[in-house]
Amino acid sequence: MWSPPRETIYHALLVDPSRCWTVAQVAEVAPGVSVEAVRSTLHLLLGDAVMEIVPRQRLLTLRLAPDGADVLGRTIADWEPGHTIGDMSGAKAGQR
């Protein structure tokens, strides 16, 4: 389901697919997205095996799984045409 915060986060993660991320680091590069939205999205991606935990880190640190960049890229491509970051005009009721 498309949402501006999710799209912003996905694009941020795809800038450097091999990078390891904390919630705070993603929030820094995802303008206008709350830390809570980043945390929720990363946990969903972790649960869907799109991201994986980087072991032996003090803070929760995640990276894209081996096929994670492909999954996010396909997800972005599958969203309805016309969506742009920050544009809710194409969102259906209940998808905000």
Image: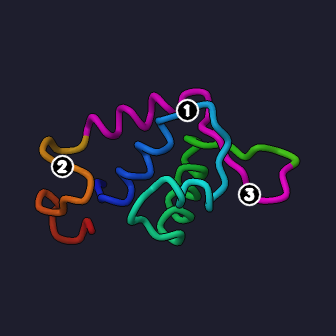
Vertical position of residue 74 compared to residue 5: above or below: above
Which percent across, then down, holds residue 55?
83, 45
Q: Earlier in the sequence, mark 2 or mark 3?
A: 3
Residue 93 lies in quadrant: bottom left
C-alpha distance separating marks 1 and 3: 17 Å
Residue 78 lies in quadrant: top left
Vertical position of residue 27 compared to residue 71: above or below: below
Vertical position of residue 9 compared to residue 24: above or below: above
* Image marks 2 and 3: residues in contact by CB distance under 8 Å: no
C-alpha distance separating marks 2 and 1: 22 Å
Which percent across, then down, holds residue 15?
48, 35
The span picked out in magenta is 57-78
Q: Which residue is mark 2?
A: 83
**On-image quarter of the N terminus:** bottom left
Q: Secondary structure at mark 2?
A: loop
Q: Secondary structure at mark 3?
A: loop
Q: Residue at x 76, y 43 (%)?
A: 54
Q: Residue at x 62, y 31 (%)?
A: 18
Q: Residue 68: within the magenta?
A: yes
**On-image quarter of the C terminus:** bottom left
Q: Residue at x 54, y 58 (%)?
A: 28
| Residue 84 placement, left or right of 5 | left
Crowding around mark 3 (Cα neighbors within 10 Å: few <14, some 14 to 19, many 20+) is few
Q: Residue 59: within the magenta?
A: yes
Callout 3, which amino acid?
Answer: Leu
Q: Secondary structure at mark 1?
A: loop
Callout 2, which amino acid?
Answer: His
Residue 86 lies in quadrant: bottom left
Q: Earlier in the sequence, mark 1 or mark 3?
A: 1
* Image marks 1 and 3: residues in contact by CB distance under 8 Å: no
Q: Which residue is mark 3?
A: 60
